[in-house]
Structures are given as structure tokens and as C-alpha cells.
Image (cartoon, coloured by chain):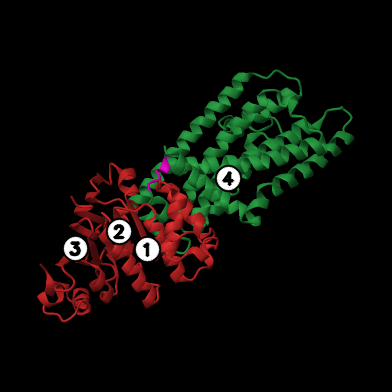
Chain colours: A red, B green
Amino acid sequence: MSILSVTNLRKSYGTTVAVDGISFSVAPREIVGLLGPNGAGKTTTINMLLGVLAPSAGVIRIDGHDLATERRQALSRTNFAAVYAPLPGNLTVAQNLRIFGMLYGVANLARRIDELLEQFELGGFRDTKCGVLSSGEQTRVCLAKAMLNTPMLLLLDEPTASLDPSTALDVRTKIRRSTASGVGGVLWTSHNMYEVEEVCDRVLFLSHGRVLLEGNPRTLPSEHGKATLEELFITVAREPLALER
Amino acid sequence: MHITRIAAVVLRQFYLIRGSVSRLVPLFIWVAIDIVLWGFMTKYLNTVTSSGFNFVPVLLGAVLLWDFFTRVMHGVTMAFLEDVWSRNFLNMFASPISIFEYLAGLVASSVFTSAIGLVVMLLLATAAFGLSFFAYGMALVGFLMILFIFGIALGIVGCTLVLRLGPSAEWFVWPIPALLSPFAGVFYPVTTLPGWMQMIAYSMPPSYVFEGVRAIVTGKAFAPSSLITGALLAMVYVVIAAMFFMRVYRQAVRTGLIARYSAESLS
């Protein structure tokens, strides 16, 4: 059974269609990259998966639970980190993790917080307010929050955007390891094609709200006559009609 | 309803208040100033009138009760605004918390913050100006309950306005109690008002409280049924306010407002 199953998902605002009937899934222990140029519908899709944007049509099932009718069950198995959703800067790292741990109903919360502080090398910032942390440290706090409930579905919207290459590599390694050793799946958006190639098992290219291409990020470029994933991305952004399925 | 998620909203408010003098002091400083100001005012009035009428339980008691109502309303709104100011909607509403649990958390936060103001006011009014709440008898419990419930209702309306109109709408929210005070008959009988204002007054739960306060301290007949009317009205307003919030929240989820909501993007 898929961790995430999206069927004919659509979002329109009046006559403007942001997401146009997309379907895809994420399997256990799979990292799927959701790629596309700005305005392709990636963030709209993620917002619908998070339950903060109501779809115009379609069904989202997370670990077997319909998000529309079993919101609590679906969202308690989900978590996310996004550059545009920092944790409140007026609370300390530990306070934020405790509050979100309670919201997600995490068992043995104190121990889980200690584990995550160690895992993301945040022990020294436990009692520091998030607002005074560097952007890289804040990103690590967001990732720690995203892992609090050991989610079945982890949504990561450009999770390494503000990290230096070394820390970004650490984060990628941690997420790959935890995905490989766990039972959940990851949906990952990024504009860093090197990162996508390294991390993702499969990618979906979105363009104008539709899934234009899907496949293995290491073989997909050559299948479409391109040398690199970055070149393929640029083609998707500039000449999507040339790649219509 | 899951108590841990409600407790998380309260704990967040507790952490913020504990860690910030600028959040802690306003919980009691303005109400304390009001009590001191009106305390001396009532003392002065007691000396210049020859009737022997004691203004303390009427005026100072009314100020205390009105300030309590205001603190309750602001307690709900402040807890909500913390999410607005810290741009925390996406994190909060993408979690498993239900909207009723979230509202319950805001209300519980307000119980905690308004209780601090109430205790300070009671201590100050009793110790410095001799206000005795035994004068109101058991009706005091009813008075506080009505004002608490109506304060919750208005607090939810304030949250709804900010959710619908954006962060800058908070400036509509703060003066709401002041806008209502002329109709509530805080300092004068409702019969003083012109007919159309009386109609509005009797549709507002606080008017039943302040009419009751005056009736009790002046030894006039006080019908407990008026307290029941006030309480029922307050409960109706809470239900309407919660429905109003739900409607605006659902619309915000439909239009994407929740996802886009931030102090920078809306004004």
C-alpha cells in the first residue's frame, strides 16, 4: 500500500487552474522529488497535502486515511519542513519542539526531543530562541520538528535551501538513512538538481499544474535526449510542449 | 477533542508570557491603573455627595467587572495574534489539531491570563478601597460567568475579523469593548439611554450584569431570571461567534488564505 496516494487532484481559483488533475503516489521507503519551475503548482500541491488548502476535486490518502474525511488521522502521520514556514522565533528550540510534539501526540516526548536535538546537532541551542538562530540552524530546527512524530509521510519543501553544502549533505544523508531504515516515504521539492539526483528515487516534473514527466532522476535526462537533470528542468520550464507525454 | 493539543496552545501562551515582561505586565498594569483611578474617583464622590450613597460598590465594582470582561476578550485575541505575529498558521493548521481544539486552547489561555488580571483587581480594590464583594452575594458568580462567556464570544469575533481581513485588522479588535460600553450600562441604568440604544443594550449580556449590580447594592428588587437571560444570551453569542469563525476558516482553507497568511503578504 502507498504511503501517499493522490488521485485526480485539482485546484482552481475561478478560471485559473493551479493544479490540473494530477495523480501520483509515494511508496514506503521511497523519496519522490516534486520538481518544476516557479508557479508549476508544487507549493499548491504541498499545501493541499498538508490540509491547509482545500482541493477543488480529487482524493488524497495518507497511509490509507482520506485527508478530507479523516483529517486528524491523516495529519498525525504527516509532517513537513519548508523554508517559508519557520517555527515561532519568540520560543526556544526546546519549547517549540515540546509544543509541536504535543500537537502531534508524540509519546515519550522528552526523550524524543533529546534524540532529535542530538541528531540535528542542536543540543547547544536547546534554550535559545529560534529567532536568533542562523537560517541554517533554523532549518535544522524545522527538520527536527518535522521528524518529531516519525511521520509516515514527510513533506520537504526545499529543505536545504539555506544550508551550507556540508550541512546540506549531512541533512540529506540523515533523511536518506531514516527513510531507508523506516517505513515512511518522503516527498521532496528542490531546485537543486544535483541534490535531487543524489537523494530521490523517482521524480515528477510539474508544469502548468500537470505532471509532465516521471521517472528515475538518473536516467530520465538521457531518455529525453538531455545530458543532465538541470538541462531537462530548463526544458520543462521553457519548452514544456516539447516534452508532453 | 484531545486535551494534549488544547494544552499545547495554552503552554505556548504560558511560555511566551513567562519569557516576556512586555507580555506579562499588561496582564495587570492597565486594570490596576483603572482600579486606582476609579478608586480615588469613588472616594472623592463619596465625600462631595450628601446622600450617604456609597459609590464604591457601584462604580468601582462596575469598573472591575468591565475590565474583567475586556481582559477575557483580549486574552482570546492575544493568543490568536501570537500565531499571526509569528507567522505560525501553516505550522499550526497543518498539524492534527482541529479547529475546535484550537479555539478551546485560545479560551483556556484566556482563562489563565484573565484570572491574573482579576486577582490583581480584587486585591487592589479590596485592600486599597474597601470594595467588598460579599455585597453582591452569590450573584457575583453569575455576573463573572456572563461576562466571561460574552468576552469569549467577542474574542472569537475579534480573531475572525483578523483572519478574514488580515493582520492590520487587529486595530479594529482592541476598541470593541469601548464601542460596546455606552450600550452596556456600565456606569448608569439602561433606562437613561434613548429607546433605540436600550434595544441594543438589552440584546447585550453585560447590561443584565450591570443592572443587577446596581439593583443589589441599592437594595432594589433583583430578579435572578435576568441573570439567566444574560447567561443564555451570552451562550447564544458564543455559538454564533464559533460558527462565524468556522465559516471564515473554511473559506480561508478554500481560497488558500491560511496557506498564504503572513504579516508581510496581507495588510
Dot 3 or dot 1, earlier in sequence:
1
The chain holding disc 2 is A
Task: Specify the subunit that label 3 lies on.
Answer: A
Image coordinates for residue A230, horizontal then vertical, percent: 23, 78
Give, as a three-letter code, the residue at label 1.
Ala
Residue A121 located left or right of residue B53: left
Mark 4 secondary-structure assignment: helix
Residue located 45% across and 55% down the image = A113
Q: Dot 3: few (<14), some (14–19), or many (≥20) neighbours within 10 Å?
A: many
Residue at the (52%, 38%) spot, across then down: B153
- Regarding mark 3 in the picture, which secondary structure is present there? strand
In space, the residues marked 2 and 3 are separated at their CA atoms by 14 Å
Q: Which mark is residue A82?
A: 1
How far apart in space, not on screen, are marks 3 and 1 (Cα)? 22 Å
Tag count: 4
Q: Residue at x 76, y 23 (%)?
A: B218
Q: Which residue is mark 2?
A: A46
Vertical arrangement, residue B227 with respect to residue B184, above or below: above
Q: Position of residue A180 (x, y in %)?
A: 25, 61
Number of residues whose C-alpha sits closer than 10 Å to that of mark 4, classed few (under 14), some (14–19) or many (20 or more):
many
Disc 2 residue type (three-letter): Ile
